[in-house]
Image (cartoon, rainbow, N blue to C red):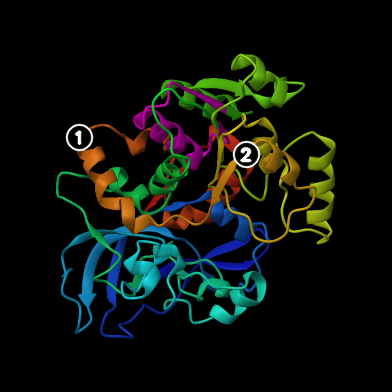
Amino acid sequence: MKALCWYGKNDVRVETVPDPTILRPHDCIVRITATAICGSDLHLYDGYIPTLEPGDILGHEFMGEVVEVGSEVRRVAPGDRVVVPFAIGCGQCWYCRNELWSLCDNTNPNAYMLEGMYGYSGGGLFGYSHLYGGYAGGQAEYARVPFADVGPLKVPDGIDDEHALFLSDILPTGWQAAERAEVHGGDVVAVWGCGPVGQFAIRSAKLLGAERVIAIDRFPIRLSLAERAGAEGLNYAETDDLVEALKEMTGGRGPDVCIDAVGMEAHGTSIDAVVDRVKQRTRLGTDRANVLRQVIQACGKGGRVSVAGVYAGFVDKFPFGALFAKGLTLRAGQCDVQRSMRPLLERIERGEIDPTEIITHRLSLAEAPDGYAIFRNKADECVKVVMHT
């Protein structure tokens, strides 16, 4: 089969690799019909996530048709259309039983690696390095899906691939960012980053009753998409002091909720952003965290901070004093996708969310290397790349 393989920093290639096979009785094989490039994939592409090996297959947003099942699979069958969550859950451990799917105790065979970094390990992820299990990803023609009775969600015939695909990651991730922040009626919500996750965080905040959503970015196409969803755009590149600008927009109170949908490769022009960039490039630091600092500084007293952007390691100059003094609540983490896939599918069916409105580029799998370069460089007004196989 054809698959997109990693060979080094900014070096990905479409190669011919062996077809996946059933390894365990709870596996299934999916013929992939649609896959996408995620902002998290860029952390791999840019060389910031360790333990990738040349030839590893990337991609964690994918869906397709089941073509083969293991002997113990009961809930899906050949011919079913399914969308596959990026986090692999076993369904049996304490975390899965409590719907903390991304923290599964049993799906990361390399758990010792993450335990060494974080004290504990989360579950396995598709196409996201050997830290997270070394599972082959979904930017390919076929994929092996473990625990097929636990993760894949059947897609109704009336929902096409592009409407269902983002249930694999970015739609639930944006939803969870707003949900974990306990967004409710009357809230003013500020979202940093109007990429795909930020777009869905904006739409989710509106669905949960936010009175106002302020969308922060520097790219006109992203701000335009946010405004189309009912947000107020704020171009940080045209603002001398973002915290003061948010105070002015909120009558001095600041936002009730601040969402970081950017993560470890944040851009910025402040001194701390420049220092972060130098440290990251020289491997003296892991994460560019100026957005994380901004959301804590900007959030109003008693507010809630939700972090959906991926962070990998250590952050310095962290304003814990501001977090403490203002009585903020901070929540973060990988998305527990399985928990919200079905409810969000129902919202798609009712027309409450149209995931396709953020798609700007449709490519073939053979064009995946170009897609990565376009997405990373935000060329050609790129917001989201979908590949059909």
**x, y (%) of residue 333?**
52, 55
How crowded pointer 2 is (Cα within 10 Å; few <14, some 14-19, many 20+) is rated as: some
Query: Label 2 belongs to which residue?
Result: 327
Relative to 284, 34 lies left or right: left
Q: Quadrant of residue 241?
A: top right
Q: Quadrant of residue 239?
A: top right
Residue at (55%, 54%) from the top-left corner?
40
Q: Quadrant of residue 82?
A: bottom left
Q: Assign the N terminus to one quadrant of the image.
A: bottom left
**x, y (%) of residue 356?**
35, 37
Q: Assign the C terminus to one quadrant of the image.
A: bottom left
Q: Is residue 389 visible?
A: no
**x, y (%) of residue 179?**
41, 42
Residue at (64%, 22%) from the top-left corner?
246
Is residue 199 rendered magenta in the image? yes
Q: Is residue 129 above or below residue 319?
A: below
Query: Label 1 belongs to which residue?
Result: 350
Magenta stretch bounds? 191-215
- What SS does tag 1 mark? loop
Relative to 1, 68 lies left or right: left
**x, y (%) of residue 219?**
60, 28
Q: Is residue 349 above or below residue 132?
A: above
Residue at (61%, 61%) from the top-left corner?
44
How crowded pointer 1 is (Cα within 10 Å; few <14, some 14-19, many 20+) is rated as: few
Mark 1 → mark 2, Cα distance in angstroms = 38 Å
